[in-house]
Amino acid sequence: MKIKVLFHIDNLSEGGAEKVLCNLVNHMDLNRFDITIQTLFPCALYRIKSGIRVKSIYPNNNRFYRLIYRIETLMRLTYPLHMRHDYDIEVAYLEFGPTKVIASSTNKRAKKIAWVHCDFEIAIKDKEEFVKHAAKQYQQYDKIACVSEKCKESFVSMFGNDPEVVVIHNVIDDKEIIEKAEQPLPSIAEKRKFTLCTVGRFSPQKNYMRLLKTVYRLHEEGYDFDLWVLGDGEQRAMIEDYINGKKMESYVKLFGFQKIPYPFMKTADLLVCSSDFEGFSTFVSEGLILGKPIITTDCSGMKELLGESEYGMIVLNDDEAFYKGLKILLAQGEDKLKNYAEKSLEQGKKFSTDYLTKNTELFFESII
């Protein structure tokens, strides 16, 4: 008999958690698992293979239905009104909203799993208030699945290890990444000189202002390179204002959300991650699979991916350290980058789709 699994997430938009969820379900064995994804609103940005149900709770993403959602979630009605079914496992695949919803499940038979993609100790400002409210929700779960060891350490320090907290790494589609990276670079981009590339949502946690300030500072010092930024989000206007105000348009290119970012990543000379916090970075994982040199701030998951700067450079999580690290890589030239690229490619082989999918399937089967 198949194990019936419900994954609840806000949407299937361009975010990292959304992407890795699609990677996971697309590679799970549908002879063993009956899978449903329940979003808040209709969305169709990522491809889901045939045989997986995708349902939405509300018909439209507008002010009225967002208000209804807030009211129903506050009253613990979202699950009983919209999601009741005979699932064996119910997964809140994102923090906050989905975690609240599945915590109010009326299906007493189902095992419940809360997925954690971020380092709460960094992401949450008022930790005491957050723990006071969220602890009651997490107590409704049978397991907590964190995407990295750092996420687990952070969660346990705030909530303890009851329910049990485990590490389940994100599933990355390595074959698709390698295949699509061979596509031609879109006509909107032109490789002119040494090029940095970053991919991600324009949100505070990504700290693109740190990256832009560093790039501006290095250009003022005479370093000549381009920066490609792929993504979109709530901070776009602020980012554009900074670029325009500093007259950086000639060497900083915003390409918006790209469904297939891999030709950009493969063409670039160095991948850069300036985040304040991550869970288990999809962008850095994909960079390893493509064998690219990488520089990143020291946030959750990076040491699992890059070791102690063996497979890419990890710098302290502050503006000056990021500036100094990037300057070193620009100054040291091809040899340092070639060494990182070779080691990056070897490390990327450890994150194969088949291995990570099977590990997650075994985790589901173990709790039934």
Image (cartoon, helix red, strand yellow):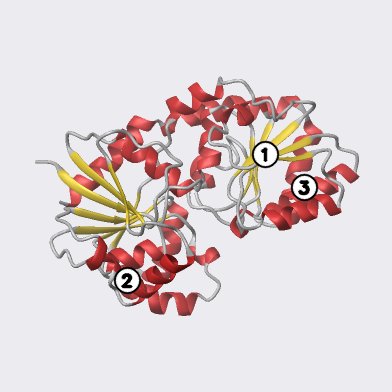
**Residue that mark 2 sits on:** 137
The 10 Å Cα crowd at callout 2, few under 14, some 14 to 19, many 20 or more, is some
Side of 140 relative to 342 (left or right): left
The furthest residue to the left: 1
Residue 298 showing in the rendered view = yes
Pair 2/3: label in front: 2
The 10 Å Cα crowd at callout 1, few under 14, some 14 to 19, many 20 or more, is some
Residue drawn where x is 45% and y is 27% of the image: 176
In the rendered image, the vertical position of residue 288 relative to residue 44, given as above or below? above
Q: Amino acid under label 1? A: Phe
In the rendered image, the vertical position of residue 260 relative to residue 21, given as above or below? above
Q: Earlier in the sequence, mark 1 or mark 2?
A: 2
Q: Circle 3 — which element?
A: helix
Pair 1/3: label in front: 1
- Residue 135 x, y percent position in the rendering: 35, 74
- Residue 43 x, y percent position in the rendering: 42, 47
Q: Circle 2 — which element?
A: helix
**Residue that mark 1 sits on:** 255
The 10 Å Cα crowd at callout 3, few under 14, some 14 to 19, many 20 or more, is some
Q: Amino acid under label 3? A: Lys
Camera-side residue: 368 or 238?
238
Pair 1/2: label in front: 1
Asked whether the residues under the numbered discs 1 and 3 touch, taking CB atoms below 8 Å apart as contact, a structural biologist would say no
Residue 306 showing in the rendered view = no
Q: Amino acid under label 2? A: Gln
In the rendered image, the vertical position of residue 294 relative to residue 298, given as above or below? above
Q: Earlier in the sequence, mark 1 or mark 3?
A: 1
- Residue 48 x, y percent position in the rendering: 35, 37
Residue drawn where x is 62% and y is 31% of the image: 265
**Residue that mark 3 sits on:** 324
- Residue 5 x, y percent position in the rendering: 22, 49
